[in-house]
Image: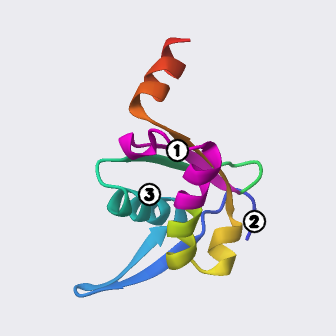
Amino acid sequence: MGQGENKKLIVITPSGCKEMAIEQRIKEIIERELPNSKANIERDTDSEKVGGRVIWAGFAGNTSLRRQNRIFGLLRRELSTSEARDISFIFTYTPDEYEQLQAD
């Protein structure tokens, strides 16, 4: 796949087939599995890798490692090995942490 081309996934739904970019699929998995979370997932045009951030109150009191394990555990259950290889890093924040980051 050439630079700048988005990888698509064909999703079979009761109403038929549709293409879905892996970025959208990751966002949907995270927001479905972490209620009231907000995921911002994008593809880097230079590296072709996917990354972003997840803001979720449920991260409160968890270490960075535990947060990453939670995110990647969810994704490993639903993505193929080749899809998972496209992920670079997903930052994790509580709403308060993200608000503080924006204020700095």
Q: Could you tell me if the residues under marks 2 and 1 are in contact, i.e. CB atoms within 8 Å?
A: no
- Whole-angstrom CA distance, mark 1 to mark 3, is 21 Å
Amino acid type of the residue tagged 2 in the rendering: Gly
Q: In the picture, which quadrant includes the C terminus?
A: top right
Nearer-the-camera pick, 22 or 38: 38
Determine the image quadrant of residue 25.
bottom left
At 75% from the left and 65% from the top, the residue drawn is 2
Residue designated by label 1: 62
Say which label, 2 or 1, has the lower sequence index. 2
Q: Percent position (x, y) of residue 23?
A: 52, 59
Q: Is residue 53 magenta?
A: yes
| 58 left or right of 4 in image | left
Q: Nearer the viewer, residue 84 or 70?
A: 70
Lower position in the chain sequence, tag 3 or tag 2:
2
Q: Residue at x 57, y 45 (%)?
A: 52
Q: Which residue is mark 3?
A: 27
